[in-house]
Image (cartoon, rainbow, N blue to C red):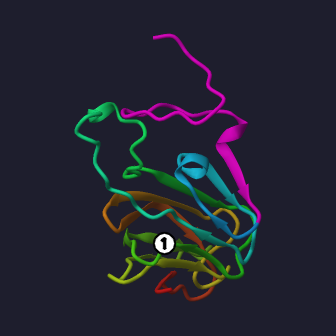
Amino acid sequence: MAKTTFSGPVYSKNGFINTGPGNTISLTADTTLTVATHAGRLLLTNDADGKFTLPTINVDSNAAAAGSTDYNNLNNVGATFNFYVETAATDMDILTDGTDKFVGAILLAVDDGAKKAFFPAAANDVITMAGSTTGGIVGSVISITAIADDEYLVHDSLVLASGTIVTPFANA
């Protein structure tokens, strides 16, 4: 198969590789994320007290008439949002719609070698980073993927912190 270049969003039912300057988006203000604009891209958090809201998880199946090629289906299971803290957090939140909850874990680490994995409680729908004990120092990374009805998986995350680290998971 030949290489092809696209200039807009492309939907694939089997995956592909993204490259180029359009694959990073700087978040400079409170933002409600969308699958079309933000999923699969590196989201550079440049708002120290930004509120970044994930889209509501949609698990609708394909219409019987259209089958598996119904690209108008709004199902967003598998959509991944990759965050990179480029501006140190002071009160930064990554939130769900309140119905969707987090599963998985975040590893917090400090430069003295201390580290700890934190798991969300059943009702947790916010990740808060304050730039110290809950993390959010420049260089922190968090990946979040819609995996099921009401479930966002937090994975591949290394959040840099300082002091005595505590969970960044909370309820809105």
Q: Which residue is mark 1?
A: 96
Which residue appears at 56% of the width and 55% of the height? Answer: 34
The N terminus sits in image quarter? top left
Q: Nearer the viewer, residue 20 or 131?
A: 20
- Given residues 65 and 154, the one toward you in this image is 65
Q: Residue at x 74, y 74 (%)?
A: 48
Residue 60 position (above or below residue 21): below
Give the side of residue 138 with respect to residue 102, left or right: right
Vertical arrangement, residue 9 with respect to residue 78, above or below: above
Residue at (40%, 61%) from the top-left corner?
57
* Residue farthest left in this picture: 64
Dominant secondary structure of the magenta stretch? loop
| Range of magenta residues | 1-28
Q: Is residue 89 above or below residue 123?
A: above
> What residue sits 68% from the left and 33% below the top?
20
Q: Is residue 108 left or right of residue 48?
A: left
Position of residue 144 in the picture relative to residue 153 (left or right): right
Q: Indicate the amino acid at tag 1.
A: Thr
When asked about the image quadrant of residue 136, the answer is: bottom right
Q: Position of residue 129 (x, y in %)?
A: 61, 78
Front residue of 150/111: it is 150
